[in-house]
Image (cartoon, coloured by chain):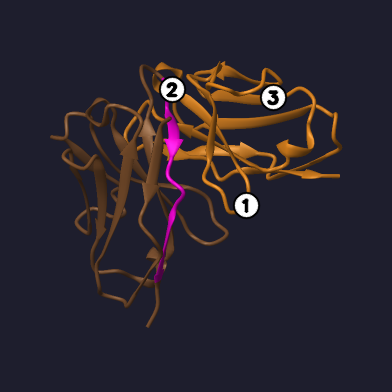
Chain colours: A orange, B brown
Amino acid sequence: EIVLTQSPGTLSLSPGERATLSCRASQRVSSDYLAWYQQKPGQAPRLLIYGASSRATGIPDRFSGSGSGTDFTLSISRLGPEDFAVYYCQQYGSSPRTFGQGTKVEIK
Amino acid sequence: QVQLVQSGAEVKKPGASVKISCEASGYTFTSHSIHWVRQAPGQGLEWVGIIRSSGETTSYSQNLQGRVTVTRDTSTNTAYLELRSLRFEDSAVYYCARRGSGSCDLDYWGQGTLVTVSS
């Protein structure tokens, strides 16, 4: 199965700053089927990005995804107070689908 | 609007079984696959299994193979997750989620069902 490694584990930033999260796959992700999810405490995950770079419905354009093959990035251009959360990448191009371990974006 | 509403929290003893439901509304139930994902307390997300839109194909995590079954009832637009021979480490929040259209991934999620395995 494909192992996804996210870095950093925790990102401490101030509101208004830019966040850059990394997700590296142990093998090529088929069709660049890589998604990013945001999860806040006590809530279900929310789909942000699919197909490596397509924003899901209703997601603000400050969220962007890039990358292909084995290296992917989620960028948040200007952090709003509601963006402090845990972010997971997930590949769904190969079975079984697998998740990264998560990156926590916390207020500095 | 699309909604996935899950059944309530469960407390089970080791070795018992649990069956969780996920009632879908707001879309054509048979047009989308349903996935199950779990999250142990304070941990990350783990994929559990899928029932495809055809309803004829299921697939499961190797970690749970043989103990888990996903089914659906198209008359009530409800998907089910059954987990047998429960272990302490099965304690988690279990989520159902809909696979979106085309290359879109899990675009709608249920609210989660907490399963606690305790003696």
Return the mark for residue A75: 3
Q: Position of residue B114 (x, y in %)?
A: 44, 62
Disc 1 from disc 3: Cα separation: 21 Å
> Within 10 Å of the Cα at label 1, are there few (<14), some (14-19), or many (20+) other Cα atoms?
few
Q: Name the amino acid type tagged 2.
A: Tyr
Q: Quadrant of the N terminus of chain B?
A: top left
Which mark is first along the chain, 1 or 2? 2
Residue shown at 72%/36% (left/top)?
A83
Reading the image, the residue beneath label 2 is A33
Pinpoint residue B43: horizontal percent, then vertical percent.
54, 56
Q: Is residue A1 visible?
A: no
Q: Quick check: B62 above or below B92? A: above
- Confirm whether circles 2 and 1 share one chain: yes
Q: Residue at x 48, y 59 (%)?
A: B40
Q: State the separation of the CA atoms marked 2 and 1.
A: 26 Å
- In the picture as drawn, the residue positioned furthest to the bottom comes out as B119
Chain ID of residue with mark 3: A
Reading the chain from its start, which is encountered first: label 3 or label 2?
A: 2
Query: Label 1 lies in what chain?
Result: A
Corner quadrant of residue A107: top right
- Residue of label 1: A41
* Stretch in magenta: B104-116
Q: Return the chain for callout 2.
A: A
